[in-house]
Image (cartoon, rainbow, N blue to C red):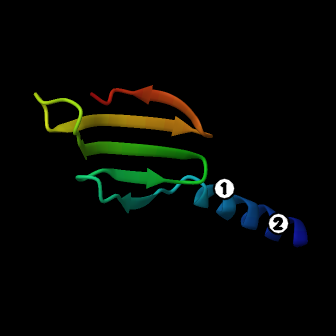
Amino acid sequence: MKKKLALIVTGILLLACLFPMPNHLKDGGTVEYRALLYTVSRVRRLNDLDAERSYQEGTIVKVLGIELYNNVE
């Protein structure tokens, strides 16, 4: 009985690691979706450096803190 309970609790904890929580940043519209194992950021931030474009857009994907994808321009 205890073994079944331990497996159920472990399964619930593993599922909780996969569901993201949205975090809205105050930099122009960036939204981060953070779970314990990964982070996906939809970037839209104001840009002071480039006069042609007033903002930066793109997506950043990190798994276990390692950046796998970044197309922010």
- The residue at the point 44 percent across, 27 percent down is 69
Name the amino acid, label 1: Leu
Q: Which of 47 and 64 is in front in this view?
A: 47
| Residue at 24% over, 36% down | 57
- Residue 37 lies left or right of residue 33; in this view the side is right
16, above or below 32, in the image: below
Residue designated by label 1: 14
Left or right for 13, reference 66: right
Residue at 68% x, 62% y: name it.
13
Residue 46, given in percent of the width and then of the height, sits at 22, 45
Tell which of 61 and 14 is nearer to you. Answer: 61
Q: In which quarter of the image is residue 6?
A: bottom right
User: Between marks 1 and 2, how big is the CA–CA gap?
Assistant: 12 Å
Q: Where is residue 9 in the image (x, y as percent from the top left)?
A: 74, 67
Mark 1 or mark 2, earlier in chain: 2
Give above or below for 52 relative to 11. Answer: above
The residue at 89%/72% (across/down) is 2
Q: How many numbered marks are there?
A: 2
The quarter of the rendered structure image containing the N terminus is bottom right
Q: Is mark 1 on a helix, strand or loop?
A: helix
In the displayed structure, does residue 48 sit left or right of residue 18? Answer: left
> Which residue sits furthest right?
2
Label 2 Cα crowd, 10 Å radius (few <14 / some 14-19 / many 20+): few
Q: Where is residue 17 in the image (x, y as percent from the top left)?
A: 61, 55
**Residue type highlighted by circle 2:** Ala
| Quadrant of the rendering where the C terminus is positioned | top left
Dot 2: what SS? helix
Crowding at label 1, few (<14), some or many (≥20) Cα neighbours within 10 Å?
few
Where does residue 3 sit, x and y in percent of width and height?
Answer: 88, 65
Q: Name the residue under label 2.
A: 6
